[in-house]
Image: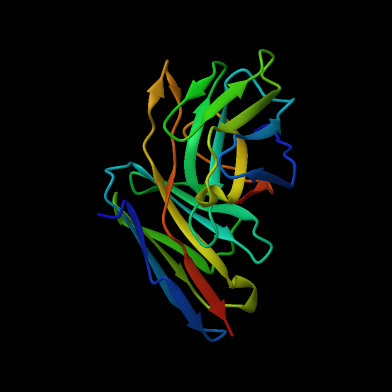
Amino acid sequence: DTAVSQTPKYLVTQMGNDKSIKCEQNLGHDTMYWYKQDSKKFLKIMFSYNNKELIINETVPNRFSPKSPDKAHLNLHINSLELGDSAVYFCASSQDEASGGISTDTQYFGPGTRLTVL
Amino acid sequence: DAKTTQPPSMDCAEGRAANLPCNHSTISGNEYVYWYRQIHSQGPQYIIHGLKNNETNEMASLIITEDRKSSTLILPHATLRDTAVYYCIVKAASNTGKLIFGQGTTLQVKP
C-alpha cells in the first residue's frame, strides 16, 4: 500500500538510449512532480503536473518528456541519454489544502530511481 | 521564494533533544516554513510546517520567532533513525508547489 511508488528502482543504461521511469500515487492527489538529485546531493525540481496539465517546467532539456496518462501517474521519458543524466530521480505528489484561503500543499516523495548512464 | 540558511552539520546524543536552526530573514508574509528530511538513500519525508504560530505533531515541534526571520525544528528525543539531512524550506503560498531545497543540515545522532 505504498503511497508513491516508482519503477524501476535502479536503471543502468548506455549513452544514447531512450528510457522511461514510471511513477504512481494512490493518495488521490491532484499534483505530481519530478525532482532530480545529482551526485552532489542537490535536489532540484524538474516538472510539475496538476490534473494532467503541465504547470512547472524548470528549463529541463527537451530530451526529458513527462507524460501523465491520468491523475495518479506521471512518467518520465528520457531520450538520447547522456552521462550527465546520471542521478537519482524522485517522484512526488501533493494535494492543495486550503488553510485560510492559502495553499499549503505537503509533498510526499517516492523512493527514487537511481539512473546510471555508462 | 525566500532563501534559507542552515548549519551544514550537527551532532546529537541519542535520547536528547535535537534543535535544528534555520534563518530566513527575507521571508514574506504569506510564505510558510516547511521542514523535510532525507534519510540516506530514501526520498525526502515531510516533517512539519508553519506560518507564524508554533506547531507540534507526532514527529517534531516547530518554533518560529515572532518576527518570522528564523525558526527551530525540535526532535524531542532523537533516535539513531533520526540521522538524516534536514531541509528548511520557505515556500510561497501559491499553487505551483515548487519546493526549493538548499544544502540542509546533516544531523548525526550518536549512541
Q: Is residue B101 positioned above or below B53 on the image?
A: below
Q: Residue at x 69, y 46 (%)?
A: B11
Q: Which of A77/B84 is in front?
A: B84
Look at the image and name its color scheme.
rainbow
Q: Residue at x 41, y 56 (%)?
A: A110
- Looking at the image, residue B85 lies above or below residue B24: below
Tell me what residue is drawn at x 59 percent, y 37 percent: B16
Q: Can you give x and y, in whole percent of width and height, for residue B91 in the image?
A: 58, 32
Q: Is residue B109 left or right of residue A25?
A: right
The residue nearer to you, when weighing A54 against B20, is B20
- State the image coordinates of residue B54 (x, y, percent, origin top left): 54, 19
Judge whether residue A85 can be spotted in this image: yes
Quadrant in which the C terminus of chain A is drawn: bottom right
In the displayed structure, A51 sits above or below B30; it is below
Give the quadrant of the N terminus of chain A. Answer: bottom left
- Give the number of callouts: 0
